[in-house]
Image: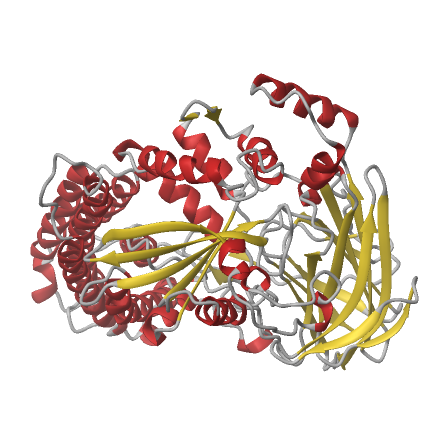
Amino acid sequence: MPKKLKDIKKDPASEKIDLKGKVFREKKPIKKPANIIYKEETPIKEVKDLYSGKKQNYIYIRGKKFTPPRYLGNLLRVAVAGFLIIVAINAVNVYVAGKSMEENISEIAYQGYNYILDAGSMATQIQFDNALEAFENAIENFDKAKEELWFINTDYTFYNEDSNVGQAVNALLEGGKYFSFAGKHFLQAIEEFNKIPLYFVSKNNPDILNPPSITDTLRLGLEKTDLAIEQISLASEEILKIEESTLPPELEARVSLAKKKIKEISTTLEATSEYFPAILKLLGDRYPHRYLILFQNNNEIRPTGGFIGSYAIMDINEGYIEKLETYDVYDIDGSYGGIIEPPDEFQAFTSNWRFRDSNYSPDFEISAKKARWFLEKEGGPSVDTVIAINQGLLKDMLEITGPIQVGDFGTLDAENYNLLLSYVIEGKVWGEEDPKHLLKVFVPIFKEAILREENIGKVTSKLYKAIQQKHIMMYSSDEEIQALFESAGISGKVHESAPDEDYLSVINIATGGTKSEQFMEEDIHHHTYIDINGKITDEITLKRSHLWSDEIYFDWKSTLAAYGFSEMPDSIIDILGRGENKVSTRIYVPDGSVLIESNGTDVETKYDKDLKKTYFFVDMHTKAGETSEVWIKYRLPFTLEFEPASTYKLIVEKQPGSRGSIFTKTMSTDEEVYNLALYPDEAVLTKHGDVTYATNLVYDKYFSALWGR
């Protein structure tokens, strides 16, 4: 007589089973003020630097309509698909790993799934040979397990092949085999993809006369990926055959959740194949692809990251860079004699709109289109794709290359490059006609250093992080490519708010011409009050502190002296960071929000027709060693309907180019309104029944709270 199945769902009515073994229970209402369970606030007191700290994520939750994101994240890193296979397998092994059926079958099948998990671990560590062998072993074990099911054809009891449990066993084993095949194909695809950076580097090696075609290699990898997706679909079909509603309670919950997860992943992977043509286009497969690269100095903050001081035109053909030329933005701006009226808010620092100020909107698609228009208007070439890169990324790259010897000038490294480049350019050390001469000498040497074979993996990791933090954004006039950018989360599009969703984004626009943003600490405090009728009032307190000090001055003086610069004119030091930080600030809130009061008379309510959002506009000037502050109170255009409970949702988007702000979220309500649940877990309920949540705003954030009455 076979052994009984393990009890994996003791109380189906009150628990949800997660495939990773966690049990989630609904939170009970916490009413004020008696018998409250609470955690004291632990507000953050300092901002982590952009280049440190752990990655943080957020998701959009739309109440009952919430659906987890179904895209792969950064689709350009197709290797991630291999990891998704492992996630899927972790979902499918719910029965095989935990069953206590016939010992021999259990052991063999369990070993088969372990081979898959081992293969995934090896793949993420780039141990491809070992991973391929593990997938091969997994395939063999699943076949062996099927052979051991000899009793299913003769046994007419609970485990008969026509029974629900028998079908579940068959489906899980067959699905496991298909997953193993898929993993094998994915690894073969990754092997092809990994050749691409090496081929790319070989283009810069004069000893290699005929480097391989990158696009041909990519196409082969994509074909392998398609084969893997086919196997995933077959695995999904097997698992979806199971009628979990007729299974014993021990199996029903896990099989149901497994089917849901596998279907999601199968749909996601099938969708990725739609973007393969876009990837080939980006690499100039059939026709050369031309890029406009905007180099933004985020020490002089602008809506999409920073002031556009330089730009490059890059042509890619068959996967190789055929042309990469860097230009001073003032050269093309100065050669154009037309008059273009700037937006109202830009008139404080310019009377004639030019290419260098084209990034006027925080939505990168809008600004990129304007940059393309300006480039052509001023006599430049037409381009297919626009990429914005913030200067802060250069620090990461120099950490990889180490010090770069720039001719007889000396070395530039991650610690001194910003000061030295800025001093030489702003001080016009090489003369009025060629102030960026040092940059022109530095770029080709840096390019050669960063493209060394041993640096490729490190560069990829840094770029991925920069994309997540919106220090790299992309737009293309090609619809297929733009769809890829949006799915990968690198389009820089501003979030489109739902009618019942709170929203906040603080966008600073430097107007003083100084590079002082690097010394600014920003503190954003967002408070929400909900009354008994569900009406919502928000208050935002924005503080900006200028942290320049004499210690920084003496450090700079020492560094510059080592390079032969004995003089430090006050005008240059002010431009490089000591000077007054002047910004025009847009505080974006939901469309229809109404200003109630503020601590100043100069706060204006405006409307962004492109983003369809209301924003409050104010100028903030902060001298070195001082702090400026603005406080605004406003009413949201929607209310919460307590029937019997309602969710307050807030999306907070960081400014592209920002190194991070201290963000504190607090909530309070009428006494009759009580909290039922909070997201994220770091949010706490105080002993007074209020809510507080503090974080470093280096990534976009999501916050929600469920309230009852």
**Residue 165 drawn above or below residue 35:** below
121 or 305: nearer the eye?
305
**Residue 503 in picture, x, y percent from top left:** 68, 69
State the residue at coordinates (20%, 54%).
Answer: 186
Can you see residue 479?
Answer: yes
Picture quadrant where residue 709 is located: bottom right
Residue 360, placed above or below residue 211: below
Q: Quadrant of the N terminus?
A: bottom left
How many numbered marks, from 0 up?
A: 0
Drawn side of residue 630 relative to residue 513, left or right: right
The chosen color scheme is secondary structure
Q: Position of residue 80 (x, y in %)?
A: 32, 53
Between 218 and 128, the one nearer to me in the picture:
218
Give the answer, above or below, for where 137 lies relative to 160: above
Q: Position of residue 313 (x, y in %)?
A: 37, 56
Name the spot of residue 133 as percent of width and height, x first: 13, 41
Q: Is residue 68 left or right of residue 618?
A: left
Identity of the residue drawn at 32% across and 53% down: 77
Residue 309 relative to residue 575: left or right: left
Between 277 and 62, the one nearer to me in the picture: 277
Taking the spot 62% from the left edge, 78% from the top edge, the residue there is 498
Q: Return the residue nearer the eye: 121 or 8.
A: 121
Residue 4: tell me if it is visible. Answer: no
